[in-house]
Image (cartoon, grey):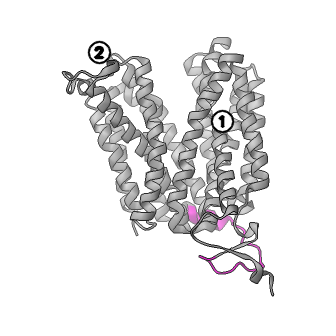
Amino acid sequence: MSDTDRREVLRAGGFHRLRMQAFFSMSVLYLFYYFCKYNLGTAAKGIQDEFGYSNRDFGMVTTIFTLVYAAGQFANGFLGDRYGPKRIMLIGALGGVVANVCFGLSGVFWLFILFWGVNAYFSSCGWAPGSRILFNWFPEKRWGTWMGIYNALCYTGGGIVAIVAGYAVYRWGWRSAFFISPAFLLVMGVVFLFYGKNSPRDAGLDVEWEPPESSQPPRRTGGRDYWIAFTNLRMNLSYISGFGANFVRWGIISWMIKILAEPVPKGGFGLTLFAAAAITSLAHWGGAVFSLLLGVVTDRVFKGTRWQTIVIGFVLSALPLFYIAQGPVILDYASSIALPWGLSVGLLLLGAAMFVSGGMIQAIQTPLFDLPGDILGKERGGTGVGIMDGWMYVGASFAGVFLGWWLDTYGLLAGVTLMAVVSLASALAAFLIRR
């Protein structure tokens, strides 16, 4: 009996132990990646108070992160395909830990910029290689469901780190955020080292949805593969959609609290800072919920095609944004109805609009990041995911500088309208992706 005859066959369905170990060790590792890139916000005030940095000065640190992260995404999806996604994710985890510790030990502005830029690069080693592991372990018609779980765990990580790092800063000062948070990533990196597997083949399994594995190693991805992923027409339409999605997503994350808390005479809603933050936070919870929903929809309803779900997600994000763009007048709806805890019907409707619009624009990454595997094949899937995420963070950069200029020039509510229009334009690009 040959070795191939003796290999266990991984079925398309079910919850095989090795598959679950590979997927969840990878996904939870990426969850803890967020501990090393979303911990800066909790420490920002402490750093500024100690060193006297202005908002503009400290904003340079976050701008460097966004730009370097985008550049890293263009490279690391390809490197994961070429050298193995597990290897790249482990390098990223270790590099992120070291960069965070160095940042926490720093006390000079240029060192803050240097180490946070280094951290941005290593942080970009996670998402695209992890997506390649997902593509390897699941058949194409199940990618949506599991990408939804992968995406939802990301948002969970962003929520948890705010609590962990926030408590650390409260108890021990801002530097502790860069020592305690990376400790979680380091421990999970060790777990992933033992339980993470690139593919069923690496775990000694064949898969029933593909021909039996040969004894030859898989083909190494090369420069031609990168060029194909970069220039493919349908992928470029996907990149345009991704650019728009992250422009709107980061527009909400970066500016919506300000828009809701700004006094009415200055073009805002006049809410308290706490109320504005609480309402905007609904976008993150919506992202987790709708990530799971859109993953199931693309697999079960549309049978593994993605463009329909993407178009629906963009439209359902745009419509509530147009509603919010009406301004504080929406808070007066049904104002005669008394509700407990100081709530009003208008405030609840505003929260519901934020939950749907912010949730959908974040959850839309679930079907978007399945597209590279669909269009390019899983051998180039990580490369395509990396390029897409790179363009998405270019979009995030525009949500900072360009959208800030737009708000200053045309007003806060005009910025909300622009986000809605960009969402609809991205839906059109996604419609053109259809097979």
- Between circles 1 and 2, the one closer to the viewer is 1
Closer to the camera in the image, 167 or 246? 167
Closer to the camera in the image, 373 or 34? 34
Percent x, y of residue 298: 43, 61
Image-based side of 416 in relation to 404, left or right: left
Closer to the camera in the image, 154 or 270? 154
Q: Name the element at disc 2.
A: helix
Residue 35 numbered tag:
1
> In this rendering, does residue 242 appear at all?
no
The image shows residue 20, relative to residue 35, as above or below, that is below
The image shows residue 156, relative to residue 292, as above or below, that is above
Whether residue 220 appears in magenta in the rendering, the answer is yes
The image shows residue 8, relative to residue 260, as above or below, that is below
The image quadrant where one finds the N terminus is: bottom right
Q: Name the element at disc 1.
A: helix
* Marks 1/2: CA–CA distance: 38 Å
Percent x, y of residue 261: 39, 20
Q: Which residue is mark 2?
A: 265
Crowd tier of the residue under label 1, counting other residues whose Cα lies within 10 Å: few below 14, some 14–19, many 20 or above: many
Crowd tier of the residue under label 2, counting other residues whose Cα lies within 10 Å: few below 14, some 14–19, many 20 or above: few
Q: Amino acid at mark 1?
A: Phe
Percent x, y of residue 29: 68, 46
Question: What residue range appears in magenta?
Answer: 208-229
Q: Is the C-beta separation of discs 1 and 2 under 8 Å?
A: no
Image-based side of 296 in relation to 1, left or right: left
Residue at 66% over, 39% down: 120
Circle nearer the N terminus (1, 2)? 1
Secondary structure mostly taken by the magenta-highlighted segment of the chain: loop
> In this rendering, does residue 422 appear at all?
yes
Using the rendered view, name the quadrant where residue 217 is placed. bottom right
Residue at 57% over, 48% down: 390
Whether residue 421 appears in magenta in the rendering, the answer is no
